[in-house]
Image (spheres, rainbow, N blue to C red):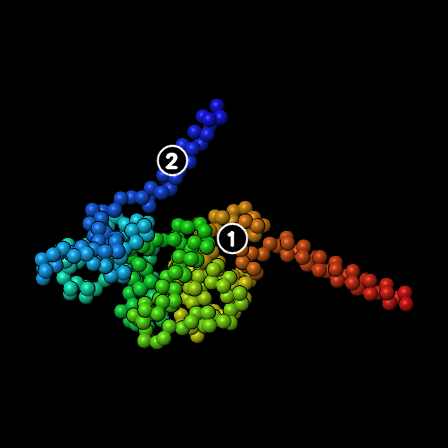
Amino acid sequence: MLNLIRNVFAFVLLVVSLSVNSQESRPLSEGALHCLTCHGNQTYTLQNPWTGQEEKRLMNPYFIIDTTHYRTGVHRTFSCTDCHATDYETYPHAAELKLEPLSTCLDCHGGDDTYAKYQFERIDEEFQKSVHFVKSGESFTCSKCHNQHYYKPTARNSSTVSEIVSYNNAMCLSCHNNLARFQLVSDQQNPVLAQVHAWLPNQELHFRNVRCIECHTQVTDTLMVSHNILSKEHAVQKCVECHSSNSMLKASLYKYQNLQARSGKGALGAVLQNESYLIGANQVPALKLLSILIFVAALAGVLLHSVFRFTKK
């Protein structure tokens, strides 16, 4: 009987696991598999017309696709030529194809009612106000931050704050912590982030638990993620902006329904179990009142003790 229960339990776990991972395990298109024959490997093979021999060469590391990440991205079922020119079907590829302009998110998603809930047009309006667009113009496209091969809507789907923070901050650090990529959009020397943020108390703790955009964007409550990146002069540097009962993080990092659902056990449950606990923001009225009463009682005890000492002298 015990073995039967174990087998049933194992079967249920298997079904749940398969259902959870079904969306991420959908097979790649034939076109993508064909391209990944080369672009999913460190080397590729070509027929050298000069020597008439077949040669194996190293793939440019910037053109290598991480197939593991690609399979979990939102575009995994597309063929490569859905976004890239069909001329890439000819191999070896023509050299001038490297000048092909890359598609932006709006090229596919703009004006499409299917994606209206994602507000791509609003995002584009916000982005055009950002310091990235102001300084770089049209050359700063969506792909500078969002890798079309690997992009996942983590903020919408994840129930783990640390995963959301890690995924989003990796976008910023892919340029701001990488001199080669930084110089694609700027002639300035890439600043050392630790020195720039030296004023920030518990710097490592902040980097690990909040996204760069919490302090470096203008919060727009009607958008899932604000894309108006502010200049460093306008970045948030006041602790109270986050560490207060009306924390600005409630309109940004903690506003998602998938995170709010985790605090359904009440205020005390949120403090005890929610990993997104924030000093000053997660205040429990009952505990706050209790702390005030304890402080008043302690103060009264000290005063009463002082009175007795003074009167007995």
Along the line of sight, the residue nearer the viewer: 208 or 220: 208
Quadrant where the C terminus sits is: bottom right
Q: Position of residue 118 (x, y in %)?
A: 34, 55
The correct choice, above or below, for 310 with respect to 47 in the image is below
Question: What crowding class fits label 2: few (fewer than 14 Cα within 10 Å), some (14-19), or many (20 or more)?
Answer: few
Label 2 and label 1: CA atoms lie apart by 28 Å
The type of residue carrying mark 1 is Glu
Q: Residue 285 carries which label?
A: none
Q: How crowded is mark 1: few (under 14 residues within 10 Å), some or many (20 or more)?
A: few
* Residue in the image at 51% along x and 55% along y: 276
Residue 175 visible in image: yes
Q: Is mark 1 on a helix, strand or loop?
A: loop
Q: Dots 2 and 1: beta carbons under 8 Å? A: no
Amino acid, disc 2: Val
Q: Residue at the spot x=32%, y=60% of the render?
A: 146
Q: Residue 84's spot in the image, x, y percent?
A: 20, 57
Sequence order check, earlier mark of 2 and 1: 2
The residue at which mark 2 appears reads as 15
- In this view of the protein, which residue sits in the foreground, 123 or 208? 208
The residue where tag 1 is placed is 275
Q: Position of residue 283 (x, y in %)?
A: 58, 56
Q: Where is residue 20 in the image (x, y as percent from the top left)?
A: 38, 42
Is residue 112 something one can see in this rendering?
no
In the picture provided, is 285 more to the left or to the right than 184? Answer: right
Q: Residue at (41%, 61%) from the top-left corner?
A: 169
**Figure disc tally:** 2
Q: Quadrant of residue 178?
A: bottom left
| Farthest-out residue, top | 1
